[in-house]
Image (cartoon, rainbow, N blue to C red):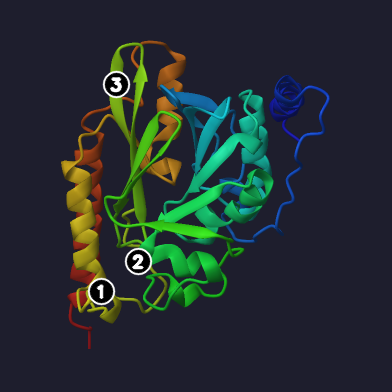
Amino acid sequence: MNPAFLSLLALAAASTLFWTGNATPATLEPDPPFECTACEAWNRPLTPFRVFGNTWYVGTSGLSALLVEAGMEDGRPALVLLDGALTQSAALIDTNIRVLGFDPADIRVILNSHAHFDHAGGIAALQRLSGARVIVSEAASETFRTGQVPGHDPQAGYAPDNGFPPVSNVETLPDGGRFTVGNTTFTLHWTPGHTPGSTSWSWETCERERCLEVLYADSLGPVASPGFRFSDPQEAFGGASTAQMMGGSIGFLRRFDCGVLIFPHPLYFDLDAKLAARATGGENPFVDPAACAAAADRFEAALEKRIVEELAPDEP
């Protein structure tokens, strides 16, 4: 095992004692590991770090998970977790939270970007550990209850291999719905396209006197299993195509008042480059008012390329 990660485990044990004294800490009961060609690389440990203000990165090197220190409730820290990555990532997320000095039992709410195995896989175990509420978009609720993607999901053709452990007691919010934990208010933005229930979340966080909007934006890449066409109308969307839905979501991203932008896959926000830049000192590289518009341009170009390929006449 990575020596650096062994030191994190030791620190995690110490931080657990900090919060619980001599009490026996809650123990994670993980679900069986998910097997995929990219899973090992995605699940490599990464030292947790502060992104900005009350927002921390607690995910792996290849799959994002964010922890928001949302204030106090009932005399204890109130935490909000965004995404659970793979089933086998839950243990790494649990450790990263403890390394930062927090107690996973203080997670009050778990949120999700989209209901695929690589972002929702660890949520059931993390909910069992913390007793947290799980809040998702209305369009994603059935997928969470069953653990299986619907037929109009662009990656449904991979089913059942892209399912995940079902989640109990799922709550929903509509597009634009809000809820508050501690002193932090979160807003749900339904951004369908990558999946029918794809969701982006925003909240305000401050450092000293500087306050910014953080957007945890869902993936907007036109990724699909063989045979799926983004240009085809979907009955579930009232006859609109997935491409039309994704185009609207890209428009939302372009218009958003960007302060800090994080995606479920670190490659979409150049995590490695930002960490390298941060190590040299200077301005926080995660603060980038132009990031949302730039990402929207990239996703729009990818979607346009996909549609051109779908609509091109078959070669004789």
Of the two numbered discs 3 and 1 on the same chain, state the one appearing first in sequence: 3
Disc 2 packing (10 Å; few <14; some 14–19; many ≥20): many
Of the two numbered discs 2 and 1 on the same chain, state the one appearing first in sequence: 2
- Verify CB contact (< 8 Å) between mark 2 and mark 3: no
Of all residues shown, which one is farthest toward the bottom?
316
Does residue 45 show up? no
Q: Amino acid at mark 2?
A: Pro
Q: How many marks?
A: 3
- Which residue was labeled with disc 1? 237
Q: Amino acid at mark 1?
A: Phe
- 277 to the left or right of 146: left
| Residue 61: image location, x then y, percent | 54, 39
Residue 181 falls in which quadrant of the image? top left
Q: Is residue 202 above or below residue 163?
A: above
Secondary element at image label 3: strand
- 206 to the left or right of 299: right
- 285 to the left or right of 50: left
Q: Amino acid at mark 3?
A: Cys
- Which residue was labeled with disc 3? 211
- Which residue was labeled with disc 2? 196
Give me the residue at 66% from left, 29% from top. Answer: 98
Distance, label 2 to label 3, CA atoms, is: 32 Å
Distance, label 3 to label 1, CA atoms, is: 37 Å
Disc 1 packing (10 Å; few <14; some 14–19; many ≥20): some
Give me the residue at 59% from left, 61% from top. Answer: 168
Secondary element at image label 2: loop
| Residue 238: image location, x then y, percent | 22, 77
- Verify CB contact (< 8 Å) between mark 2 and mark 1: yes
Distance, label 2 to label 1, CA atoms, is: 9 Å
Of the two numbered discs 2 and 3 on the same chain, state the one appearing first in sequence: 2
Secondary element at image label 1: helix
| Residue 283: image location, x then y, percent | 33, 14
